[in-house]
Image (cartoon, rainbow, N blue to C red):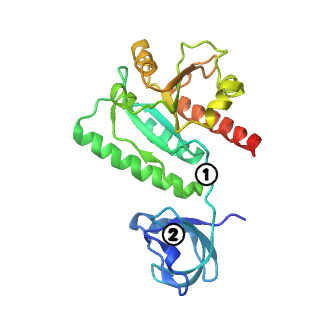
Amino acid sequence: MSLHQLFCTNEAIAREVDFPFLLGIDPQDRNHVKALRLEVGEHIAVVDASSDYFEVEITALQGEEVWVRIAKHLDAPNDAVPVMLVQGLAKGDKMDTVLRAATELGIAGFYPTEMSRSVVKLDAKKKDKRGSRFVQIARSAALQSGRTTIPEIGSIRTLAQLAEQFGPHDLVIVFWEEEDLENSVSALFDSSATKSLLGCLERIWIIIGPEGGMSSDEVQCIEDSEATVVILSLGPTILRTETAGVVACALVLNELRNCAAQVS
């Protein structure tokens, strides 16, 4: 049976080896803790501020205070190559939907990006407000899904600015509705060239356009970066941007885990 999991604010609980200690709980997580209906003697998993992962036993509950002792150190699950989702800015709550689902799937980073066909136009104040909301959503989704890490949230910027981050050890996968159908995720990961490349990669970037898709100039901008760039299709139908982001992440992460399982 899997353990309930919490992110705690304690810097390094590995030092707390001899006595029970107060678990630092972020105020925004208190309602989640109450909903768990924790009991003395119960074991839970916690991730501290140093990203260390432990199983702890609850020794006392005093109001909102949770006292625990370390039961054992846990090995945090870790995907071999971090996957970053670059999502073209979309209107309404579509970005929230994509971020929440992609976090549950296991992305390492989320980069909301202004593209030429983005309907949404944000000033600096609104960008900051939206960015803060994205951080909260990522944390909540990571907590709910039992992840040991919270995705990094990139600042909202243009695609050209973001492309400057793509390095020679990155693989950038652009999902474009104008690409040939045979260029699929499964075909990419079935190739021996991709399998040999995986061991050298630092990051995999998934690029999804907004409503209306990406322009050919934007695709060219990505191809001009220092990264290895491939253009793929998500199939014969045109997906909504919020659907495409989630489907793309699911497909790529599944292929990566299959490759890792074959190696081990």
- Place of residue 186 in the rendered image (x, y in percent of width and height, measured from the top left): 69, 26
Contact between marks 2 and 1 (CB within 8 A): the answer is no
Q: Is residue 130 above or below residue 39?
A: above
- Place of residue 123 in the rendered image (x, y in percent of width and height, measured from the top left): 23, 35
- What residue is drawn where x is 46% and y is 19%? 223
Question: Residue 187 appears in which quarter of the rendering?
Answer: top right
Amino acid on which disc 1 is placed: Asn
Q: Which residue is mark 1?
A: 78
Question: Residue 199 appears in which quarter of the rendering?
Answer: top right
- What residue is drawn where x is 68% and y is 42%? 257
- What residue is drawn where x is 61% and y is 18%? 237
**Which of 241 and 264 lies nearest the eye of the viewer?**
264
Is the residue marked by circle 1 packed among few (<14), some (14-19), or many (20+) residues within 10 Å? few
- Which is in the foreground here, disc 2 or disc 1? 1
Q: Secondary structure at mark 1?
A: loop
Asked whether residue 93 appears in the rendered view, the answer is no
- Place of residue 240 in the rendered image (x, y in percent of width and height, measured from the top left): 52, 26
Would residue 69 be found to the left or right of residue 218 on screen? right
Q: Which residue is mark 2?
A: 33
Amino acid on which disc 2 is placed: Val
- Place of residue 235 in the rendered image (x, y in percent of width and height, measured from the top left): 64, 20
